[in-house]
Image (cartoon, rainbow, N blue to C red):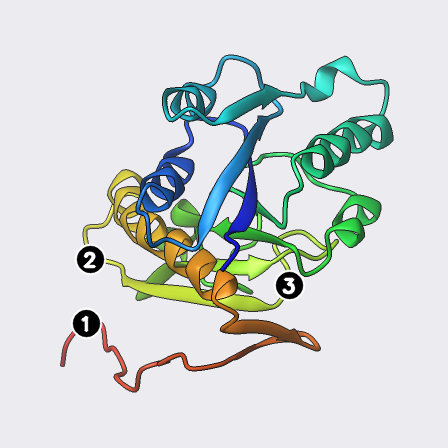
């Protein structure tokens, strides 16, 4: 079976990229990373790609007159590498509806909250400030609205009484690094499809156990 061809878009250190690189190194993993694109030059994520022998490309948004020409360059690079699925992994630029719709149902994102709660930035600090008992992370198909789209996978993470922003970030990342390769695998194996504004699954165990925090 032909492996799913991934294009990963980043803006920074690329820890979720590394999780995908590690997963793709397994012979039985059903996807390969064809290209890594960063909108910022010199970031650690580009080094990770190069060290893994993956094509690493910088498309600096600051070098373009407008968003349209910047996104045309992104699209051309992805198309040139025959990408099937775009994975946003810490890509910190809002994309226009034109670009998103070009890749509709072929582009996913990971966000450090239980969407639809806490869209945008500073999600961990906001969750702690609000006193929620669970934070989390979400993998979803991308839509033109920020941090919106059919949800593929989520992790609910208990927030400790003495939680700090730094400790919650670390806990959340540990789940993100497990989830992104798992979600890509499900897509590659045909177990996920978009049905309206939701995701439908085939041969996937969604589990039955609930979680309580703090424990009674």
Q: Residue at x 81, y 49 (%)?
A: 97
Q: Residue at x 69, y 40 (%)?
A: 94
Residue 37, image x, y percentages: 59, 28
Q: Are marks 1 and 2 in contact (CB under 8 Å)?
A: yes
Q: Is residue 131 visible?
A: no
Q: Residue at x 31, y 82 (%)?
A: 207
Q: Relative to 2, does residue 16 appear above or below in the rendering?
A: above
Q: Which mark is residue 161?
A: 2
Label 1 element class: loop
In the picture, the quarter occupied by the C terminus is bottom left
Determine which residue is flagged by label 3: 149
Determine which residue is flagged by label 1: 214
- Along the line of sight, the residue nearer the viewer: 50 or 134: 50
Question: Which of pointers 1 and 2 lies earlier in the amino acid sequence?
Answer: 2
Q: Residue at x 39, y 48 (%)?
A: 124
- Along the line of sight, the residue nearer the viewer: 27 or 127: 27
Label 3 element class: loop
Question: Which of pointers 1 and 3 lies earlier in the amino acid sequence?
Answer: 3
Q: Is residue 56 left or right of residue 61?
A: left
- Along the line of sight, the residue nearer the viewer: 203 or 41: 203
């Amino acid at each position: 079976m032909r492996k799913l061809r991934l294009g990963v878009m980043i803006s920074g250190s690329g820890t979720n990229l590394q999780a995908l690189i590690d997963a793709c190194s397994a012979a039985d993993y059903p996807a390969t990373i064809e290209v890594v694109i960063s909108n910022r030059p010199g970031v650690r994520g580009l080094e990770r790609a190069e060290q893994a022998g993956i094509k690493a490309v910088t498309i600096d948004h600051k070098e373009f007159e407008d968003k349209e020409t910047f996104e045309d360059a992104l699209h051309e690079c992805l198309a040139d590498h025959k990408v099937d699925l775009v994975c946003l992994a810490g890509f910190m630029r809002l994309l226009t509806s034109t670009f998103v719709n070009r890749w509709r149902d072929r582009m996913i994102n990971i966000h450090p909250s239980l969407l639809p709660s806490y869209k945008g930035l500073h999600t961990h600090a906001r969750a702690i400030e609000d006193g929620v008992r669970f934070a989390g992370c979400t993998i979803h198909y991308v839509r033109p609205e920020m941090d919106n789209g059919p949800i593929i996978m989520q992790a609910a993470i208990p927030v400790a009484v003495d939680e700090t922003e730094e400790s919650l970030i670390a806990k959340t990342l540990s789940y993100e690094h497990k989830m992104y390769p798992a979600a890509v695998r499900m897509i590659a194996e045909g177990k996920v499809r978009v049905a309206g504004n939701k995701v439908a699954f085939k041969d996937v165990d969604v589990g039955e156990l609930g979680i309580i925090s703090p424990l009674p």
